[in-house]
Amino acid sequence: MATDQHARSVDARAIDRPDVDVKEPIDWGKVAFKVGFGLVLVLFTILFLYPLVWLFFASVKPGSEVFSGNLLPSVWRWDNYPRLIEQQPVLQWAWNSALVTVLASVTVTISSALVAFAFAYFRFPFRGVVFGIVLASMMLPGAVTMIPNYLIWDFLGFNNTLVPLWAGNLFASPFYIFMLRQFFLGLPRELFDAAKVDGANYLRMWWSVAVPLTRAALVVVFIFELKVAWTDLVRPLIFLRDIATFTLPRGLKAIIDNPSIGGEKHFELLAVGGILITVPMIIVFFLGQRYFIEGIATTGSTGR
Amino acid sequence: MTRWSRLVPLLAIVMLVLAACGPSGESSSAAASEPGGSQPAGSEPAASGSGGEGTGGMNATGELFAYGFGYETGDIIAKTRVDVFNEQYSDVDVTFSESGFEDQGFLTALASGDAPDVVNLPRNSIGTYIARGVLQPLTDCMDQAGLDPNVFYEGARNQVTVDGEMYALPEFFNTRVWIINNAAFEEANLDPESVDFSDWDAIAQANEALVKNDGGLTRIGIDPKLPEFLAMWVRAAGGQVISDDGMESLLDTPEVAEAVDFGKSLIDANGGINEFSDFRNTWDFFGENNQVAADQIGAWPMEQWYLNVLAQNSPDAEITVKPFVDRDGNTLTLQDGNAWAITTDTDNPEAACAFITTMVAKDTWVAAAQARADEREADGLPNTGVYTANSEADDVIFNDIVDLSDYPSLQEAVQVVLDGQETAFGFPPSPAGAEFQQALTDAVNRVLSGEADAQQAMADADAEAQDAIDAAAR
Amino acid sequence: MATMVQGKEVRIVGGVPWTPNTKRETLWALVFLSPWIVGLLIFTAGPMLWSLYLSFTDYDPLRPDITFIGLDNYVSMLGDRRVSTSLFNTAFYTVFHVPLSMGIALFLALLLNRIGGKMAGFFRTAFYLPNVTPAVAIGTLFLLLLNGSNGLVNQALGVIGIDGPSWLVDPAWIKPGIILMSLWTVGNTVIIYFAAIRNVPVELYEAARIDGAGGWSQFRNITLPMISGALFFTLIINTIASLQMFSEVYTIFFGQQQGQSAGAGEAALFYVIYLFRNAFEFFKMGYASALAWVLFVVILIITVIQVRGSRRFVYYEGE
């Protein structure tokens, strides 16, 4: 993996600056460009990292310092972490969240990839119109369909269970259908014709040709949905009543909603919760992003 | 294909997890729907050995779902009260939503096949639900429980009474008082005791004397807290923003325009709303370096719970607490808080009645206040008590439990708060409370930012609010 | 209609010549589409039609009776000041947010594409971070950054001699402040562009290099056309999302903020926020449904225009 990555990045650099030559004298324009490039990079990185850093320090501060002007705590309160975990069934919540998130992401990736492939590859009557319906189903604000939707799940007997939090994803999501369709459309049609000659049926063609070649996009879908499901608060709020079924955001919401008398909200514990929610996402993203770099251009099996 | 193969193990793991989780997901949801599966660990009553009906006065059994309240995530005041109920009614099993009240969540819960039996909701929005027939009248329930409606402060009672019937039992009682930063007053050569807060000219003069500007606002003189506290200023001017029955908007009255104009003049003397708000947003409101400790405010009317924040975070910053008064010097304050109600959808009205009457009963409050006092003592912190809407409970709490003899200034402050309880008023039960507040807030904000003049803006808001009330009252 | 395929006259159905091959592909398409079709029938179509019906009623979810009132809701919208205000606010936001976010995301994706070696993963993760950082932290941070008196943004403007505005209070500056804030969570778009850029065949650049094309020319003639599908996708999606902007603004300006109200009032009233308040705070579900359907039609029209307008610029290798 590492060598592939390296090879690809060397490639990219060579392409972007085609006239680099080691023996050339120092080109001050290029040095300035490099310095500028580095500065921009550092600037953006600080901008993007700062809130997380702030959140982390807030999670180890005494409660009264969370919103003070100082970034660093005056006393490091590491015990905020065990405090939150002992007070509330946080680990149970995290487990529920993980379960819902994995199920939601796996189902939506597979189902959306199936549906998207149909729109990208098959030629069938009224394809444009049907695809228009996919887009249109994203255009009505969710606020007005929320109650009917809730009643359907209630009618199916899934109220107060984790099922409504992910099972809707079995039926694909318009956003991902659209996104994956764009990537499938980028695949040369000859690839599929070749597979057809080999006698593959369409399902096999989808699984062994289309899916592998768009894995970067599929990983993107998977990661996007991980984030959406992991941080979802609206559905857990209306579907979950029992504290044992709560997800992490739902549990944190319960803590925010029940401050002590006297307005003392434990913001430092909320910050701990925020870190507990964020860090797993960062790890997953860090692991997943390696797959982004494997575009079809480097697979070597595209028949080019 | 080789790199693709690396994804396969990942997918395989995902599938395994999926397969492994399936059954456990089932079991956790089964436990949730099974009665008793959701019973909070701490709610097992100590006296359940007898298996009898408990010590409660009513005959109540079965299950309850309470929306808008937290037990597991609640503080000692919440937990103790629920424990008291569980002890008295060991045959009733209560589940809590473990979330604050939200219109959206309550609405969907009502729509489900298993609607909440009881609800804890803000008194300010209760009229909306009474007008729509969601809540039960409580006269019978209170008779049964032997609960005298007159134990509740009048201001709170009025908020939950429509056509002579009470639809909810008031819980907490938050009032407002003037909080004065002694250091700022001293620097401005003002005496906190002698500034007359019934005289609006005196307030304006104090404001100008207290403002501090070093190339930018560094201390607000007096913050009128608009639009939030407009109703209180209007009362002080002798008017009202809305009629007592909540059916008639009175926003288009001279007292309202006068109060808005006065508030705007205070803010303008601090440099105008932009600078004023920006500066206020920099305060460390809940921290050690709050606006009093940092000398960033002269005086402002504020909810009484903030006294606790100050006592805990900046005990050395000296403050004076004075009652909010009308122009004749009579104590006058705006109050709010939550209330307990029974939904018309409940299938267990007996237990619901037993629950809500127990939650606001004197003995329950006293037990909770005692538990909190013990907790405070163990932490070595002053205990400033719990302000309930039950005047009998308050009597016991503040006479027998709260002891602030070591903290004279806090003791004085608590007394000021208590002195205002009887005359405190609240937002009446209007069928369109939220729309009324929207009209009021938007209009005041337009005036403060200079987009409209007070009279015109409030007249527009009045028409808008009245339309909303009429439409909702059908 | 009919056309000639391999010497035979064939009917045209739904824009496709109806041959045995088409028949087979249609059948297979149905198989592939089945998850979506089932979901559409159970969870989407019903609620959508229900809300369309409600838009012609005075439905209040807490009252049992529903009265059909014809077009009354739509007529009242015309006289509702908050509808025009919120439509303007939403349009203002969309017009600035969509192109700016796409431009910045493309810039960042190109930046990421230049980074190789061990740090690459770190930077990619860093650029995505705002998307996974809880909204509370982001909201708080922005209240600090955009504060008119001591916020970093205005301090920076002060350095170059500009007296910065009251981003969070002044009705004229609240929307620009919100747009600034929105640009910060472009991570999703960056990732989509980045994945698309990585999909561009290296051979194309090699060929261009041989032809002596410079960096800009390569970007203009290879990168841009090759990622046009992703650009098109994000244009459509970001526009729809912008027109439905809700959570971030609701949290900061309409929720409880550390016990102090930001109180932006109408300057931050976005269309879906007003819709949400009507549905769940004022219980005017009928009116809210009418608001929703008007927005639906507006988005539909804008999307159709975008789809038609983009047709010339979007390049699909497979087509």
Image (cartoon, helix red, strand yellow):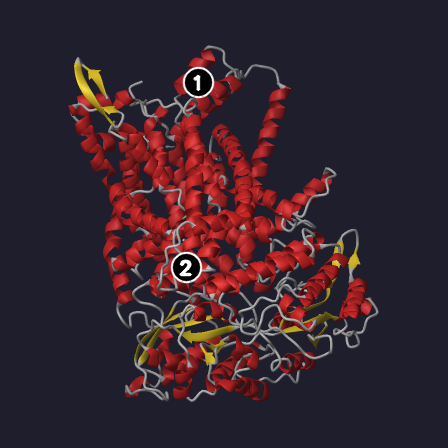
The residue under the point 25% across, 37% down is C33
Q: Secondary structure at mark 2?
A: helix
Residue placed under numbered mark 2 in the picture:
A250
- Vertical position of residue C48 compared to residue C1: above or below: below
Say if residue C155 shows up in the picture: yes
Q: Do marks 1 and 2 both belong to one polypeptide chain?
A: no
Q: Position of residue A226 (x, y in %)?
A: 37, 46
Query: Circle 2 marks a residue in which chain?
Result: A
Comparing marks 1 and 2, which lies closer to the viewer?
2
Q: Picture quarter containing residue A235?
A: bottom left
- Vertical position of residue C283 compared to residue B324: above or below: above
Residue type beneath disc 2: Arg
Q: Picture quarter containing residue B240?
A: bottom right
Residue placed under numbered mark 1 in the picture:
C205
Q: Which residue is at the front of the view, A267 or A7?
A: A267
State which quarter of the image contains the N terminus of chain A.
Answer: top left
Q: Is residue B201 left or right of residue B338?
A: right
Q: Secondary structure at mark 1?
A: helix
**Distance Cα–Cα, label 1 vs label 2:** 49 Å
Label 2: few (<14), some or many (≥20) within 10 Å? Answer: many
In the displayed image of the protein, which residue is found farthest to the right? B189
The residue under the point 28% across, 19% down is A303
Q: How many marks?
A: 2
Q: Which residue is at the front of the view, C280 or A49?
A: C280
Q: Which residue is at the front of the view, B215 or C32?
A: C32
Say if residue B293 shows up in the picture: no
Residue type beneath disc 1: Tyr
